[in-house]
Image (cartoon, helix red, strand yellow):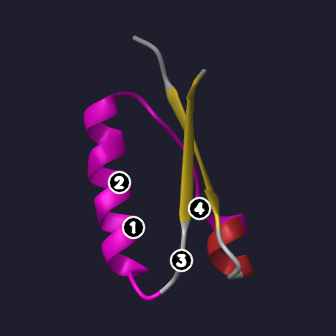
Amino acid sequence: MDKIKIVIADDNSFIREGLKIILSSYEEVCVKFFSIRFKYRDSKTLFLYTFV
């Protein structure tokens, strides 16, 4: 199974530097994406993902 690398770009340095995640499935990406998005919903965050 391919792994998916998530890079989070945000003007908040804590979020930008702290939330770099390697995930094992698209479903896990969705779960993490929405949980992070909910947690930091007041910020404008860009999520980029690539298969690694």
Mark sitting earlier along the chain (3/4): 4
Up-down relation of residue 8 to residue 10 (above or below):
above
The CA span between labels 1 and 4 is: 9 Å
Residue mark closest to the camera, 3 vs 4: 3
Q: What is the distance, in whole Å, between disc 1 and disc 2 at their CAs?
A: 6 Å
Span colored in magenta: 17-42
Near mark 1 (Cα within 10 A), the count class, few <14, some 14-19 or many ≥20, is some
Instruction: Provide the secondary structure element on which disc 1 rests.
Output: helix
Q: In the figure, residue 16 lies in which quadrant?
A: bottom right
Q: Give the mark nearest the N terminus, 3 or 1.
A: 1
Looking at the rendered structure, the kind of residue marked 2 is Lys
In the image, 34: left or right of 18?
A: left
Give residue 39's position: percent from left, percent from top: 36, 79
Q: In this figure, which residue is indicated by the disc labeled 2?
A: 32
**Where does residue 18 sit, x and y in percent of width and height?**
65, 66
Residue in the image at 65% along x and 72% along y: 10
Disc sitting over residue 19 in the figure: 4
Quadrant of residue 9 within the rendered picture? bottom right
Q: Is the C-beta separation of discs 1 and 4 under 8 Å?
A: yes
Mark 1 touching mark 2, by CB under 8 A?
Answer: yes
Q: Which amino acid type is marked by label 1?
A: Ile
Q: CA distance from mark 2 to mark 3?
A: 16 Å
At label 3, the amino acid type is: Lys
Q: Residues within 10 Å of mark 2 (few under 14, many from 20)?
A: some
Name the residue that disc number 3 marks: 44
Number of marks: 4
**Which SS does the magenta portion mostly show?**
helix
Left or right, residue 41 beside residue 34: right
| Element assignment for label 3 | loop
What residue sits 35% from the left and 54% below the top?
Answer: 32
Which residue of the protein is positioned furthest toward the top in this rendering?
A: 1
Quadrant location of the C terminus in the rendered image: top right
